[in-house]
Image (cartoon, grey):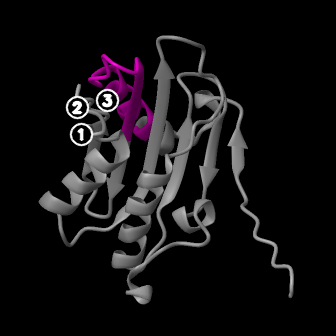
Amino acid sequence: MKEVKIEATIFVYENLASLPADISFLMQKAIEARKRAYAPYSNFQVGAALLLDNDEIITGNNQENASYPSGLCAERTAIYYAGSQFPNAKVLKMAITAGSNNKITNKPIPPCGACRQAIAEYEIKQESLIEIYFMGATGKVARSNSLANLLPLVFDKSVL
């Protein structure tokens, strides 16, 4: 038996003001999307904004349903829309923000496991990395240079 160590590297910005201007703009789009989320059951709103290589910005937010788990997360809402409307475009960057009506969310909140798997599919499909920025409603912003960094043991088409 041999031990294998897997690590992730995350870069952390102190707040929105410390982000580069283009990323701050993208995160503002994610914040706007978060404010439009439909989350009457969890009271946890998430917004996502994607920058495509054709300069389009696609946003998405979580959409809940009384019939759990029929809703959809913000990240998948945005990335599936991008794939539907711009099938040949590559996703360059993704900004995610999450906030709760029940508690303060001031630490970076990464994508859930299902969203990581969906985003991984697009990194593999487009054969290029997606830079991901994520935060709570306020506070620090984390950056991962790729989804593969957040999900190093990805399940992909090579195992099918």
Q: First in sequence, mark 3 or 1: give its number.
A: 3
Judged from the image, the secondary structure of the residue bearing numbered disc 2 is: loop
SS at mark 1 in the image: loop
* Distance of label 2 from label 3 (alpha carbons): 23 Å
Q: What x and y, as percent, mark residue 132?
A: 52, 52
Q: Horizontal and vertical percent for residue 122? A: 36, 68
Residue at image mark 3: 33
Q: Is residue 76 above or below residue 99?
A: below
Task: Give the label, 3 or 1, closer to the camera.
Answer: 1
**Mark 3 surroundings within 10 Å by alpha-carbon count, few (fewer than 14), some (14 through 19), many (20 or more):** many
Q: Earlier in the sequence, mark 2 or mark 3?
A: 3
Q: Secondary structure at mark 3?
A: helix
Which residue is the site of mark 2?
Answer: 67
Q: Is residue 58 left or right of residue 92?
A: left
Instruction: Tell me how far mark 3 sits from mark 1, CA to CA.
Output: 20 Å
Question: Farthest residue in the top direction?
Answer: 102
Highlighted magenta segment, given as a residue range: 26-48
Mark 2, other Cα within 10 Å: few <14 / some 14–19 / many ≥20: few
The alpha-carbon separation of the residues under discs 2 and 1 comes to: 6 Å
| Residue furthest out toward the left | 85
